[in-house]
Amino acid sequence: MSHTLGKPLAAALMAACILSACRSTDIDLSGRVPVPQSFGQNQAAQGSGNVARWWQNWHDPVLSALIERALQQNLDILAARSRLAEAREQAALARADLGPTSGLSASVSAGKSRLDNPIGADGRNALSRLPQASSLADDKIGGRSQSALAGVSASWEADIFGRKRSDADAARYAALGQQEQLYGTQLLVAGDIAGNYFQARAAEGRLQTAARSTAALQKMLRYTEARFAAGHATAYDVEQARAALSAMQAKHSTIEAERAVYVRNIAVLSGQVPQGYVLPDSPADPLANRPAAPSGQTPQGMIERRPDIRANAAQVRAYAARLASAKADLLPRFTISFMGRDGRIELDGDSVLKGWSSMLSLGIQVPLFTNGRIQANIRAAAARLQTALLRYDQVLLTALGEADSAYQMHTALARQTALLQSAERASAKQAADAQGLFRYGKITLDQALRAEISAQDARENLIRSQLAGAQAAVALYKALGGGWTE
């Protein structure tokens, strides 16, 4: 019998393997959106092409240490890793469904019974004279039984039309999508750390500016009070100087509170308790030493690197696999099952039944009438795939626009910062000259105060421009897909 079934079974298995190998759920994503050969706003880019660990381009050891720590300890990243581990196990589960399943079974039982003999006395007397039936002549009859059985079973659904393989592909692409989500989380966390770090350093610069202005205004106030005591200034002049000093001191406390917020954000992002966290001092000035825009970048390289684009591509392929699985539901399913058992049964110590039994079955299931359920599921899967394709195109177009916008903003802020540096130097010189002229009575207090406030505003404008430039650099690196590692 086994020889008779062997050839058809082997032929069925070979056909299953061949048909499964021919099925594919790959989908070509190229050509849907025309991708330019180069960006339109990066002609002046001359910086390092290191976008994977872009924070190293600032040469700030504190910034690098903060980001490296956050990439290891940030809770959002750890949660993303956990979701990735779950998705990978789900993919492994789907792959396991492609193979056969088998199991072993065993049972042992024993029994004893004792009942009133329903045979009358005459019958029992007659049976007592028969050696083979002497046990039936007793008032009570009973027996003992024992059994020991063991078996093995196996089953396999031959994936001839690729339904299970499509399900496994969908789970695999879903896991790849979760992997890209992890990379995207790394990108965002690195950018958030840098953004808060630059804000904190900018606040420190503003505090230094406010401290210098406060010192200058205190000197003006003391000089005005001395002139008032000598009768060369009015009470109005004294109050004006005192009001300017109070306004500057109030600004100082506000800036300190702003800096504290950014420092706490850094602590939380790096997985540390914010209470008591102290931002280390840095030998570098990250705002004044912004790296140049990265050179050698292309749209195709951005597509291959940005996690959001890669995640959407994986999602498209997952939906394509689910569509293939839905279409496979229209086709027959084939199953192969085997069961074998061995054992023996004893009654009253006599081995009356023992031996081996086996069964091999081939099954086929063909959908005949489903009231349109399968077709509706196919149409729904096709619509989901189309939605995913459109979403991929939208993400790609958005990314192309973001990259050129980031390049242009980086260049514009570099020009703005250069101009504001010249303006700040001129304002600082004017304020210093105004203090001297005021001491010699050449200009009024109002003019001297306006010069100092103008210089302070110029310094703050420069710091804000430098901050915006640093943030634009981070936005550019993120737009190019930098900030994550495998």
Image (tube, rainbow, N blue to C red):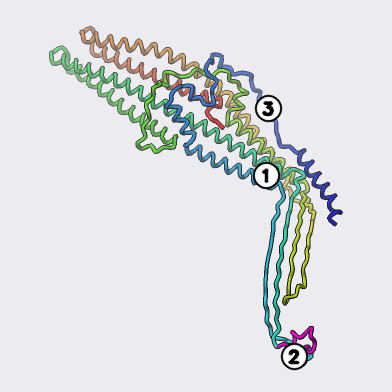
* Rendered image quadrant of residue 240: top left
Q: Is residue 375 left or right of residue 225?
A: right
15 or 170, which is in the foreground? 15
Instruction: Name the quadrant containing residue 237.
Output: top left
The reply to whether dot 3 and dot 2 touch (C-beta < 8 Å) is no
Label located before the other in sequence (1 or 2): 1
What amino acid type should be assigned to the residue bearing mark 2?
A: Gly
> In the drawing, what numbered circle is on residue 223?
none
Q: Is residue 243 above or below residue 181?
A: above
Mark toward the start of the polypeptide (3 vs 2)? 3
Indicate the quadrant containing the C terminus: top left, top right, bottom left or bottom right.
top right
> Mark 3–mark 1 contact, CB under 8 Å?
no
Between circles 3 and 1, the one closer to the viewer is: 1
Crowd band around label 2 with a 10 angstrom C-alpha radius: few (<14), some (14–19), many (20+): few
Q: Report the span colored magenta.
A: 127-138
Count up the numbered dots. 3
Residue at image coords 48%, 24%: 56
Q: Disc number at residue 30? A: 3
The residue that mark 1 highlights is 95
Specify which label sits upstream in the sequence, 3 or 1.
Answer: 3
Mark 1: few/some/many CA within 10 Å (<14, 14-19, 20+): some
Would you say the magenta stretch is mainly helix, strand or loop?
helix
Residue 217: image x %, image y %?
25, 18
CA distance separating discs 3 and 2: 94 Å
Q: Is residue 134 magenta?
A: yes
Q: Is residue 2 left or right of residue 401?
A: right
